[in-house]
C-alpha cells in the first residue's frame, strides 16, 4: 500500500492582529464603562467619571492595558475607583474596584 502525502489546507486570508494603542484601549475602556452603566451594573454617575492616564501592566496572561476611572459621586469610598483591563488586542477582560486581574 502506497502512502499519499497529505496536503495542508492553508490559505492566505488569515487575519493578522496588531496590538492596540493606548488610545484604542482607552476608547474600549470608556465603552465598557458606558455598557456597565447601561446594564445597571454601575450608577449613572459613572458616565461623567474622570479618567487617569492609561498604563500597561505585565501579567501572567501577557500585557494588558489598564484604564482607571474615578467617581467622586460614589458614596462608598472603596468603590470610587474602577479599573478596566483591556488585552493587547482590544478586548475588555475585567473591570473591578480592587485593581486586580
Image (cartoon, rainbow, N blue to C red):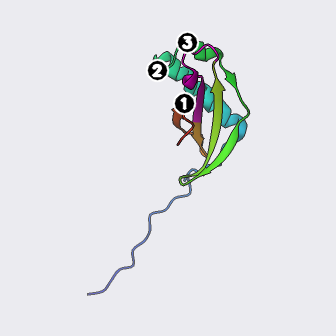
Look at the numbered discs 3 and 1 and tell me whether their residues touch, using CB distance below 8 Å.
no
Furthest residue to the front? 77
Find residue 85 and name its label: none
Q: Which residue is mark 2?
A: 41
> Does residue 55 appear to the left or right of 89 in the view shown?
right
Label 1 to label 2: alpha-carbon separation: 12 Å
Image quadrant occupied by the N terminus: bottom left
Name the residue nearer the viewer: 5 or 33. 33
Q: Which residue is mark 1?
A: 97
- In percent of the image, x 51 and y 59: which residue is there? 11
- Answer whether residue 74 is magenta in the image: yes
Establish if 57 lies above or below 83. Answer: below
| Pointer 1 or 2: first along the chain | 2
Instruction: Report x, y in % for residue 26.
Output: 67, 32
Q: Residues within 10 Å of mark 1 (few under 14, many from 20)?
A: some
- In percent of the image, x 51 and y 19: which residue is there? 42
Identify the magenta region: 72-84
Instruction: Report x, y in % for residue 40.
Output: 46, 16
> Does residue 97 appear to the left or right of 8 in the view shown?
right
Q: Quadrant of residue 56?
A: top right
Name the residue nearer the viewer: 77 or 52. 77
Q: Nearer the viewer, mark 1 or mark 2?
A: 1
Instruction: Report x, y in % for residue 87.
Output: 58, 44
Establish if 31 lies above or below 72. Answer: below
Q: Which residue is mark 3?
A: 44
Instruction: Report x, y in % for residue 52.
Output: 71, 30
> Does residue 75 appear to the left or right of 5 in the view shown?
right
Q: Residues within 10 Å of mark 3 (few under 14, many from 20)?
A: some
- Answer whether residue 61 is magenta in the image: no
Amino acid at each position: 500500500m502506497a502512502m499519499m502525502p497529505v496536503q495542508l489546507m492553508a490559505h492566505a486570508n488569515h487575519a493578522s492582529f496588531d496590538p492596540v494603542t493606548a488610545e484604542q484601549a482607552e476608547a474600549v475602556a470608556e465603552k465598557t464603562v458606558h455598557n456597565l452603566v447601561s446594564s445597571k451594573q454601575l450608577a449613572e454617575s459613572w458616565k461623567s467619571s474622570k479618567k487617569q492616564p492609561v498604563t500597561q501592566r505585565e501579567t501572567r496572561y501577557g500585557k494588558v492595558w489598564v484604564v482607571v476611572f474615578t467617581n467622586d459621586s460614589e458614596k462608598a469610598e472603596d468603590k470610587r475607583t474602577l479599573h478596566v483591563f483591556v488585552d493587547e488586542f482590544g478586548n475588555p477582560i475585567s473591570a473591578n474596584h480592587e485593581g486586580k486581574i
